[in-house]
Amino acid sequence: MNKNRRNFLQKSVKLTGIPLAGPLSIPYISGADKQIENYTRDLGIKLCLAYFWGIEPRKTALSRQMDVLGAVSPVNSGLANLPGEKDNSRTVIRAVKNAWTREGLTLSVIEGPPYLGEKTKLGLPGRDEEIDNFITLIKNLSLEGIDTICYNWMPIISWARTIVDKSSRGGALVSGFDMRAIKNKPPINEYGNLTPEMMWENLRYFLKAVCPEAEKHGVKLALHPDDPPIDNIQGIPRIMTSVQAFKKMLDIYPSVYNGITFCQGSFASMGDSTEQVNIPEAIQYFGKRNVIHFVHFRDVLGNKHNFEETFHDAGKTDMFAAMQAYRDIGFKGPMRPDHVPTMAGDSNDKPGYSTIGTLFAIGYIRGLMEGVGKGKY
Ligand code: CS2
Ligand code: MN
């Protein structure tokens, strides 16, 4: 059992600037072009892993061995090993992209983009400069052939958990969130009295500024739901907390380039004791609008006020039906397992990102894809 049990809000994973490694160390042969009968491998979906801590040689080697060749990564001068360069410069972006290429991977999604901070999300002075830098990021990503940005609209407190070592199946460790654990936490009021209406106005201002550029440069913006999808944490409003909220967001600027990261675990935890989000139906709805640009394929038990993460085969969602829905909408974009349990032998120093847990998840996802793709039904 992880000793440093923590009962406080777990801030989002800090992105570190570990420089990327050198040339490809392990040769690999991709099976991606392998045709089984007339089934398209992985339903044509780009299976990816997230690399928030720079290149991890064992993880990239395992990726090549699993034939999971998509990389989801932040982009910044630290990762590029170009201190002093601007994170949105073409030089930095190209260096990060090439470093993944040397590992035999393809940089597929920028998750956690630079220049989208509190000033933009809270409408503070200086937001126009952040937005200008974000637009430069869009232009330079496009020039380097990277076409998807996963971002969120959670200011100050990003994805949050109240426990990161809850015992799950067989003693595996998972994260969880229980509203009761934070009910006495003091409000954060250094930003004044923030309201949902202000958050919506700031999102509107941002989308009106950046969507035309995203369209012009062919870069898909994929907004991730709030996690947990509750309306307020310590006085900080959260607005991307329901299917209805995403419909409202899409209508601010109707465009294929104004889209969604369909994080299944976040959508599945949007329910409460009276109503649940029907995941296959939500996939069908947003898929038919052609706005699902990135999928986080994971699951939970419980709901937004009290949930825990689960193994991919042990949550509340019919994952086979969800995968059928991705097939039915013709989704061919990037997909990653998102959070996984920490399994025996792994440390819990990166909650949700255990190596062994990731192997289990990929095996399950690939099997699900093959079953959906070849199933006789
Ligand atoms: C995660 C992300 O909360 C979630 O569903 O997909 O928040 C992701 O784990 C973090 O952005 C990593 O820093
Ligand atoms: Mn997610």
Image (cartoon, helix red, strand yellow):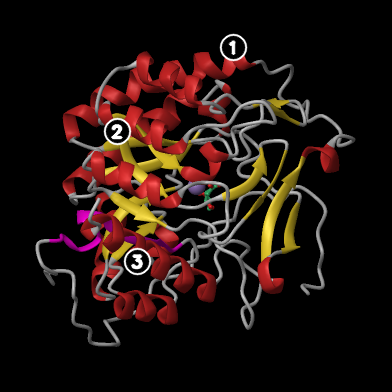
Camera-side residue of 122 and 51: 51
The stretch of residues the image draws in magenta is 39-51
| Ligand 1 within 8 Å of the CB at mark 1 | no
Name, please, the residue furthest toward the bottom: 26
- Identify the mark at residue 197; answer none if there is no mark: 1
Asked which secondary structure carries label 3, the reply is helix
Q: What residue sits right under mark 2 in the picture?
A: 287
Q: Residues within 10 Å of mark 2 (few under 14, many from 20)?
A: many
In the image, is 270 to the left or to the right of 296? right
Percent position of residue 123, x then y: 55, 20
Residue drawn at x 30%, y 31% is: 291
Q: How crowded is mark 1: few (under 14 residues within 10 Å), some or many (20 or more)?
A: few
Task: Determine if residue 374 is in view.
Answer: yes
Tell me the distance, in whole angstroms, between the alpha carbons under discs 1 and 2.
28 Å
Quadrant of the rendered structure where residue 251 is?
Answer: top left
Tell me the distance, in whole angstroms, between the alpha carbons under discs 1 and 3.
44 Å
Percent position of residue 43, x then y: 22, 55
As drawn, 210 above or below 368: above
In the image, is 164 to the left or to the right of 319? right
Q: Which amino acid does label 1 sit on?
A: Glu
Q: What residue sits right under mark 3 in the picture?
A: 367
Residue drawn at x 18%, y 50% is: 145
Q: Is residue 17 magenta?
A: no
Tell me the distance, in whole angstroms, between the alpha carbons under discs 3 and 2.
22 Å
